[in-house]
Image (tube, rainbow, N blue to C red):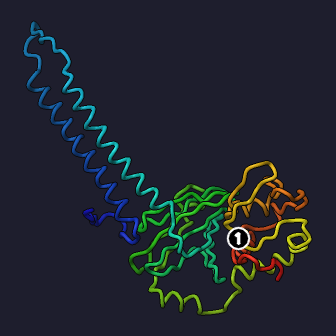
Amino acid sequence: MLAIEFPLFPPRASTLAGSVDNLYFTLLAITAFFSTLIFLCILFFAIKYRRRSEDERPPEIHGSLKLEIVWTAIPLLIVIGLFTAGVRIYYAGARPPANSMPIYVVGKQWMWKVQHPEGKSEIDELHVPLGVPVRLLMTSEDVIHDFSIPAFRIKRDVLPGRYTTEWFQATKTGDFHLFCAQYCGTNHSAMVGHVVVMEPADFQKWLSEGPQPPSMADSGARLFAKLNCATCHSDSGKAPLLAGSFGSTVPLAAGGSIRADEAYLRESILAPRTRIVAGYPPTMPAYQGQLTESQVLELIAYLKSLPPGKGDRR
């Protein structure tokens, strides 16, 4: 598809940006064409068929089936084509590649906290490597925010009490704007930041610079031990073993099953009696209000790091 550059637009710096721009400019061109055509037709008919005297009576005109089919079929085909292109872009943006690099984002009034799995964290900044697909797992600690990077043509709501995801693959190095695109309070306009795209070697160097905090998985392991989770999540049989549970299909006591993704693990930590695992009593206490969103993400990172067959205790 022809790539169109337009200097008034933000730079195009992700693999998805070109498709979004092409659909947008196609919509703009179709709108401009039909608006001009309708205006010219109105002008032409107003002049040609204007009433020339008070006694003039226009002849009756009966409908034309062919004409009605044409002006129905053409817009229908255009709409179907635009819808198909939109669906393809939506699915491309909604399904991150399997090898995507995870990065965790927590929004709060009025800042973005970015947490890398290696342990390094940032405020209102996001460093990523060039040419590597990045998957953002996002949540909010207070109100609805919206994580928007115009140069990447991505924007996704960040909601309290649940996880949302978006992904991108940067195609240019540089510094790009990061915004909150949802009015979230008095200082909403100050909730801005930067996305810094670096060469992969420079990114690894940046990760290794400065104090080296524990990885998210290690922090989660310490929290797991501090909360005495292993007391039940062990061979005691009081609660299911967690090793290798991420991504597995979990049978539920109420019937049916669910995939143990990040959202289900979060729910099981904060409100464990919502969907109880079949075969186990509902004895786990709820940690709603006792853990921050960052701590929940650390626990999930720890559970994701446990391969099948590895013990739950550290």
Q: Residue at x 50, y 69 (%)?
A: 97
Task: Return the residue found at the far top.
Answer: 55
Taking the image as shown, residue 18 lies to the left or right of residue 178, namely left
Q: Which residue is mark 1?
A: 297
Residue positioned 45% across, 72% down in the render = 169
Q: Position of residue 77 (x, y in %)?
A: 29, 41
Identity of the residue drawn at 39% across and 52% down: 86
Q: Is residue 294 visible?
A: no
Residue 191 lies left or right of residue 310; in this view the side is: left
| x then y, percent, for residue 203 | 51, 86
Is 34 displayed left or right of 86 in the figure? Answer: left
User: Can residue 151 be seen at all in this image of the molecule?
Assistant: yes
**Quarter assignment of residue 296:** bottom right
Q: Nearer the viewer, residue 128 or 98?
A: 98
Give the total of numbered labels.
1
Which residue is more in the foreground, 147 or 137? 137
Where is residue 254 shown, x and y percent of the image? 80, 48
Label 1, secondary structure: give it.
Answer: helix
- In the picture, the quarter occupied by the N terminus is bottom left
Horizontal side, residue 295 vs residue 128: left or right: right
Q: Which class describes the residues within 10 Å of circle 1: few (<14), some (14-19), or many (20+)?
A: many
x and y percent of residue 59 in the render?
12, 11
* Residue under the point 37% across and 59% down: 20
Tell me if residue 110 comes above or below residue 196 in the rendering.
above
Residue kind at label 1, given as amino acid type: Leu
Where does the C terminus fall, quadrant-wise? bottom right
